Image (spheres, rainbow, N blue to C red):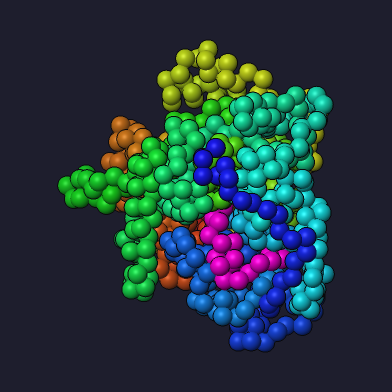
Amino acid sequence: MPSSLLTKPVQRRPSEVRLSGRVLYLADDPDLVTAQLDGADVVWDPSIKLRDNISTDEITPAYICYYFDETLGEFPYLGFKAGERFPITRGSVKRGGFVASVAGKRRGKGSSREQSPYAEMCAGIQLVVGESIERIYRENCQNLGVLTTTDFALIERVKRGETIPLAVFTESEGRITRDIIEFGGLFNYNVARLQGVVTVPECTTPARPMTIAEKIFARHWVTDAAAGRIGVAAVRPGDEGFFFTDIRFSHEYVTPMAAIFFEQLVGKDEPLQDPSSIFFFRDHLTFLDQVMRREHVEMGLLDVATQLERKQREFAAAKGVRLYGQLEKRLNLTGAMTAAGSEAICHSKILEVHALPGQIIIGSDSHTPHAGAVGCVAFGVGTTAVFNSWITKDVRAQVPKSFKVIVRGKKPENVTAKDFMLQILRHPYVKDGHAIGQIIEYAGEAVEALSVDERATMTNMAAEVGAFTGIIAPDAKTADYLVAQRGMDRAAAERLCEGLFSDAGADYVNVIEIDAAALRPMIALPGDPGNGLFIEDLGGPVRVDIAYAGSCTAGKKEDMDMYARVFRAGLERGQRVATGVTCYIQCGSQEVFEYCRRQGYDRVFADVGAVFIEPSCGACINAGPGVSRQPTDVTISAINRNFPGRSGPGQLYLASPYTVAASALAGHIVAWEAEAVPVEA
Ligand code: SF4
């Protein structure tokens, strides 16, 4: 424990709270929102339609997250869409004197960015109300000391300025979460824990049949933080504890804010615990200078964003942390200088090099479950949890319930893991929010038949499910991957997989079965990954302006194989990327980029007229080539989410790598057929 924390005073909050201020209803009606910002108080009426699915992209759009201090308080809800308008402007929430804000279902879905609740907090919001609240967002609120509730009856009490018992906000929580709320946040709680002021309840669950994820949690349960002892016989859903982490990582959107928290609260010169298992990534904003809108440049946002890179780089150097950084510009095939890319997108590199079966991995990003493709428990956490893990090397969690998705049968050749996911995402169990915070375990012969790369598409998109994480039990294919990808000894790879399966009799809250043979290539209509549809049901051709083939989800080696397969066949038929379509291909890492060169894919991409760009998150986060410019722009994209504004103002359809490439050739959305005859929508 850093010496500065040994004597740091910490205490619980008072047992009652009084929240003084107004209540902001985040309604569907933009006029109602504007009226509140102008000073009108709403008398609540259940017929008022609250906005559902307010994502963190809407609470703090990506460009707002270039700020990493209290300035964020100027910007909450700047991307909030009501009707067709964006009624909330800079500073308007802070000026309005709001203490609570109220939304509908699945509040805070999307990325794990803690900038969202931090921006709300810095604008004066102390209470977040939603019909349902997404796990990471709710945890981030608790970690920061922002109260959360789904009990709408509290709203009137807040308005009346009543004193409210703190227990109202803690009674349905486990002991640790309760203590975190009572100590006003995770950091204060951890200081109290490390000082011995507060104790963590023991795990008393007797041996029982467990899922694979539960077994991994049991192996990592911290029984004695001071002595470094871990492991209990068994856990069950609801058990809450601290778990030893094998890997902790963060990217430039989060590291600087976490670094500032660390420097301010722990001390600038204090060391991080075991920096060899911490990784930083410069991946999200590498290409930002190429696409930032002029008004944002004029607002000084490019300079602010540059600070993120610098802060992370300097902090990494000071603390001895491996940084997968930004590359120098280099020559491309035509002899021109290309823009600098990233060494890797965080999830790509964690899977390629670091993740192992049976590990617990935390990352500052909602798509951290990507690594679950090799049978580890990998999940996203917010900034406060990241910076606390630098001190403790553990993470708090409540063992989630699990549900299983069994994909049976043999899939058609033009159906991919992405199509599996779009089908799962439109299942009512997922779409109606029942899967929030649960673990999704994928199984069935169609999943077993997938490569680790394709499995990673499924675990990656556990984030869109709203799940805690996604996992696939490691098998011979996992061992093959570790041998081929890591050069690992086969016996060692197989040993790592031993015992990592779900027991017969393990508990699942739901089991969903999908017939792979009945699936067809899918798209998700703009607005939400849950808007899935078979392409053949589209009802007419949809023109395409941009085809984007990349991101952590779709920038792996096998994704590149798929793009190249479609484009090669197209070239043989004399096809190129259709007139009027700009097609971008972007790898998840330099390793994949080099793989493409070795396979000759770079030449195929050039010949077909696609733009092959250096690895980075890029367009996926509205920060690189491939973003839309106009609301009328239509993009077909292999990324994982299409929330409003995610990749520019246009209409973004999600699809598989095959569909993206085939649509780039056709100029409109088409399914790819193995025989290379496009099927018109
Ligand atoms: S590629 Fe997109 S989804 Fe993946 S880490 Fe980057 S921004 Fe997130």
Q: Nearer the viewer, residue 278 or 474?
A: 278
* Residue 477 on the magenta segment: no
Q: Is residue 455 left or right of residue 224?
A: left
The part of the chain drawn in magenta is 112-129
Q: Nearer the viewer, residue 480 or 115?
A: 115
Q: Is residue 104 left or right of residue 324?
A: right
**Identity of the residue drawn at 59% across and 67% down:** 120
Q: Position of residue 342 (x, y in %)?
A: 35, 45
**Identity of the residue drawn at 51% across and 40% down:** 3
Q: Is residue 84 left or right of residue 157?
A: left
Q: Position of residue 654 (x, y in %)?
A: 53, 54
Q: Position of residue 147 (x, y in %)?
A: 69, 61
Q: Nearer the viewer, residue 124 or 103?
A: 124
Quadrant location of residue 44? bottom right
Q: Nearer the viewer, residue 380 or 529?
A: 380
Q: Is residue 110 left or right of residue 210?
A: left
**Identity of the residue drawn at 71% across and 43% down:** 198
* Residue 116 on the magenta segment: yes
